[in-house]
Image: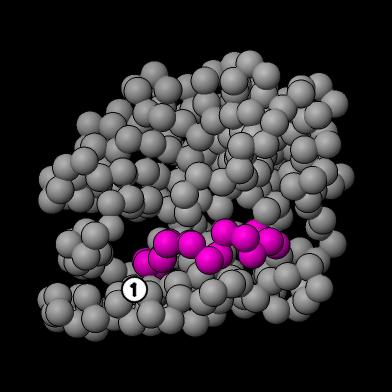
Amino acid sequence: MPEKPFSWVPKENLLSFEELFLFVKVAIDEGITKIRITGGEPLLRTDLDKFIAMINQHKSGLDLALTTNGFLLKDAAQKLKNAGLQRVNISLDSLKPEVASKMAQKDVLAKVQAGIEEALKVGLNVKINMVPIKGINADEVLDVLEYAKERGMSIRFIEYMENTHAKEQLKGLSGDEVQALIAQRYPFKAIGRVGPSPAHLFELDDGYVFGIIDPHKHDFCEDCNRIRLTAEGMLIPCLYFDEAMSIKDAVHKGDVAAAAEILKEVLRNKPEKNKWSDDDQNETSSRAFYETGG
């Protein structure tokens, strides 16, 4: 991550909430029912709760979620809940302060955990995301699983995703390796995928469900129904592709028809699979993941 938010792009290139909302309305009117605000770190945008309220007021009953690193969540949780947010996905890669500091380059763990507790307190549904890295936090898979389980939170273990900005010397645990670690303590059975979600779900004997997202596989690409809109107005059909179309001019002009046509064109060109397979690790995105968000 860059030292400062959005330091890689001039601020005037970022879409306003009003411009983002114009496109979100187009997407909702075209049938989108699930909207997730992601990043980078979305809570760095001032008055994010007002943007969520704009969406919620346009159409009730939407599945509104937020993905966050949790660092700023404690002070924002109640406002987000009041605005209509239903769920938060929170990154929690370690329960050891020194490891969390190494991974985030900042002393973050206490504030993240306070954010998690506050989110639960105000009634948000909380899901934990963990990326296990060999030699760094891979030995905490069971600890983080139990931390989530004890608090009634679901958890997804996500395979480390390489791209040209990722550290080449880092190696993540595979989905099979995560399963093997959990099997040392808990018997479980595979449930499979639910709908177009990329997560493979597994159920412990006591009914607790955890998930694994292994993006090196293509088995979720065929029915993937996700698209991403960046803060700069780029509409991206797949996280691992550099191809994108811009809606910036359309929303600057308030041209709803043009924005709708760009959405349809991006969907028509949505790839059948990612470019990232086990036998060809070189085809990875050159766009840093913190730039993608959406």
Residue at horizontal 48%, vertical 40%?
Answer: 89
- Percent of width and height locating residue 269: 43, 81
- Percent of width and height locating residue 104: 65, 47
Q: Quadrant of residue 121?
A: top left
**Which residue does the numbered mark 1 point to in the structure image?**
233
Which of the image's four quarters has the C terminus?
bottom left
Badge 1 amino acid: Gly
Residue at horizontal 42%, vertical 22%?
Answer: 120
Decide if residue 18 is in sight here: no
Which of the image's four quarters has the N terminus?
bottom right
Q: Nearer the viewer, residue 2 or 49?
A: 49
* SS for callout 1: loop
Q: Is residue 38 above or below residue 163?
A: above
Is 71 placed left or right of 266 in the picture? right
| Numbered range of the magenta stretch | 215-231
Residue at horizontal 53%, vertical 66%?
Answer: 222
Chief secondary structure of the magenta portion: loop
Residue 219 inside the magenta-drawn segment = yes
Q: Quadrant of residue 132?
A: top right
Q: Nearer the viewer, residue 50 or 270?
A: 270
- Percent of width and height locating residue 165: 67, 70
